[in-house]
Image (cartoon, grey):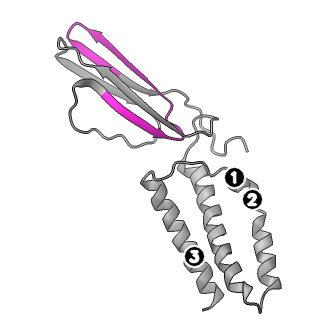
Amino acid sequence: MKTGKLFWGFFLLTLGGLFLLRKYDIFTGSFEFVWDIWPLIFVFWGALVIFKESLARPVISSVFGVFIALLLFGIVDNGIGNINCTESSGSYTEFYSEDYDSSIKTADLEIKAGGGLFILRESTDKLAEGKAKGSFADYKFETWQDDNHASVGFYMRNKNINFFRGR
């Protein structure tokens, strides 16, 4: 098989797999390390030149395809996919909950947050209940009550946008 086909095959499989795994929250880790390993492009390129007529060339080409896909995914994920709202590189899962008081007749919900996915699901015995997960799940959850009305606020704590995490 031609090494070009191996490169593109492994590149597309890896890139597609990474985007699917990220989309379905199978992993939520950081890809900041790609900024540190980009010089390996030259190492792989040099190996392809040296081993031009060798049995190692298809293996190098396949690994190079995986590496370039990982590098491209990391750049997109760090620079565009996760607009950084905090300097922390950790991954969070936070749970929010407020008990229901039977005197409450009406309630409102205010969400002030950056890009994200907010899903309203089935009813619960709580006034409000939720979960935030990901690298930037640092939110402020507040509730207050006036007579028979309750208000629930869900706000992003840090609103600073830093595309490249200080790099």
Viewer-closest of 22 and 26: 26
Rendered position, 87 above or below 5: above
Residue range corresponding to the magenta coloring: 129-152
Res 126 quadrant in image:
top left
Residue 69 has which mark?
none
Q: What's the distance in space between the residues labelled 3 and 2, CA to CA?
A: 19 Å
Give residue 28's position: percent from left, percent from top. 52, 48
Please rate how many residues cluster around mark 1, counting C-alpha atoms within 10 Å: few if below 14, some from 14 to 19, many from 20: few
Residue identifier under label 3: 10
Please name the amino acid that badge 1 sits on: Phe
Which residue is painted at 75% across and 54% down in the image? 36
Q: Are marks 2 and 1 in contact (CB under 8 Å)?
A: yes
Outermost residue, front side = 55
Question: Pointer 1: what residue?
Answer: 33
Quarter containing the N terminus:
bottom right
Where is residue 112? Give x, y as percent. Answer: 42, 30
Magenta stretch: residue 120 in it?
Answer: no
In primary-sequence order, the first of circles 1 and 3 is: 3
Instruction: Return the residue at label 2.
Output: 37
Circle 1 SS class = loop
Compared with 20, 29 (above or below) is: above
Of all residues, the one furthest to the top in this rendering is 147
Residue 135 x, y percent position in the rendering = 54, 41
